[in-house]
Image (spheres, rainbow, N blue to C red):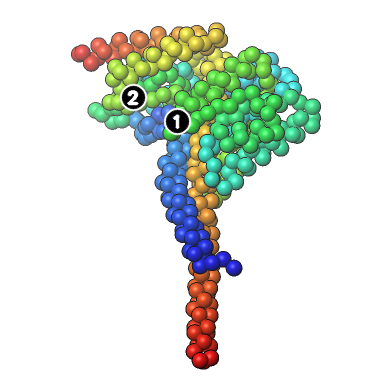
Amino acid sequence: MPSLKDLRNRIASVKATQKITKAMQMVAAAKLRRAQMAAEAARPYAERMETVLSNLASGVSGSSAPRLIAGTGSDKVHLLLVLTAERGLCGAFNSSIARLARDKANALKAEGKTVKIICVGKKGYDILRRQFADEIIEFIDLREFKQVGYVNAEAIAQNLLARFAAGEFDVATLFFSKFKSVIAQIPTAQRIIPAEIPEGTKQTDAVYDYEPDEGEILEALLPRNLTVQILRGLLENAASEQGARMSAMDSATRNAGEMIKKQTQLYNRSRQAMITKELIEIISGAEAL
Amino acid sequence: MATFKFELVSPERILFSGDVVSVIVPSVEGEMTVLAGHAPLVAVIKAGIVFVQTTESNGKEFFINGGLVEVNQETTTILAEQGRFIEDVDTAVLDAEILTAETRLSGSHNDDEKKRLHDTLVQLREFKHVFEQRKAA
């Protein structure tokens, strides 16, 4: 049976924790709004880019197609680009992305493929490092950037392109969490090299003029498309992270409230029991006289 | 006058969206004006100013650092690598852009990329020159 002082201390400490989680929830809510706006603002560009790209790509095919679309012709070496958050305390956000990447890596290894991993974000690195210490070839830290932007995505894309040109891998897959709503974030795997060209986009029957020629535009467009896809992943991730943190902190606050309620009840009961006990002792003492 | 739908998007946001009379685009092979009913076209743009004529007497200007323009029957879209309102551009901004391009050029080992960065650099320097002249005038 805990003493009254123990109970008082326990209640005080839970109350302090509740205050912290409450504050974190409100901060996440404010950040979420900004992150969500950024993610939504980036969507039109990515969509238009896809339309233009699919129009262009339908024109070139076969051996003349650039390697970023056609691939290297083999799929022996897979590169997994795993985007996670830099901070924890956001529910299952980081671990669900890491789990998806881990399952994929294990499946590929079982097929006898070589797996290489690049981690963006500290948390994913910490989780994956345990099992894939040898496969992780790079860890990119974005902690110093308050708001991730085009520059960050471009740097990662350049890194990837340099490795691709050097023949370090054949297929690259991007792992991130798609922001659906505050309570639903979907861990997603997306192939980025060779580029996934969406089929069945509406084909305008018009014949385009190209300036300069088709191939050259495609050459310039594909690296940029890679950057845009990575940027989209980063922004979706940022929004998902804040959403996940918000709901995690919301339930933490609620749980703390419940705990306080229970502990307070226990405290009051024991206090009353103590008073009753003392009264009985006094009365029986007086009677004995 | 006949208008058409025009959108100017950068990776971070939509800079302009609406009906316009004409758009002047600095394509790599020279400036061109897009009017309503222009033939479908895809062209690469260099660093420069996009002039958007919204009504007969009104226009807006944007600074663009590379990108792509797509013209089809319904809409015209510019996908800009970087875009700003012209009011937000000054010599300091351009100098910063030139510096980034220079550092990246010196750090690059890929021939294709070197060529691309070199082109960008030339375009930016050229544009800075034009920009300064404009300001002086």
Q: Position of residue A274 (x, y in %)?
A: 52, 76
Instruction: Give the left or right position of residue A77, taking residue A66 as reference.
Output: right
The three-letter amino acid code for the residue at tag 2 is Phe
Q: Quadrant of the N terminus of chain A?
A: bottom right
Q: Which is more foreground, mark 1 or mark 2?
A: 1
| Picture residue at 42% right of the left edge, 47% below the top | A27
Determine the chain carrying the residue at label 1: A
Q: Which residue position holds label 1?
A: A145
Instruction: Give the left or right position of residue A275, taking residue B23 as reference.
Output: right
**SS class, disc 1:** loop
Instruction: Give the left or right position of residue B9, taking residue A46 as reference.
Output: left
Q: Position of residue B136 (x, y in %)?
A: 21, 13
Depth check, front residue: A13 or A161: A13
Depth check, front residue: A43 or A120: A120
Farthest residue, direction front: A289
Determine the chain carrying the residue at label 2: B
Q: Position of residue A241 (x, y in %)?
A: 52, 42
Residue A188 drawn above or below residue B33 = below
How far is disc 1 from disc 2 in space, using C-alphas? 27 Å
Residue A256 shows in the view: yes
Query: Dot 1 surroundings within 10 Å: few (below 14), some, or many (20 or more)?
Result: few
Depth check, front residue: A100 or A73: A100
Q: Which residue position holds label 2?
A: B62
| Picture residue at 32% right of the left edge, 27% below the top | B85
**SS class, disc 2:** strand
Depth check, front residue: A98 or A3: A3
The three-letter amino acid code for the residue at tag 1 is Phe
Residue A52 shows in the view: no
Query: Dot 2 surroundings within 10 Å: few (below 14), some, or many (20 or more)?
Result: many
Instruction: Give the left or right position of residue A55, taking residue B11 as reference.
Output: right
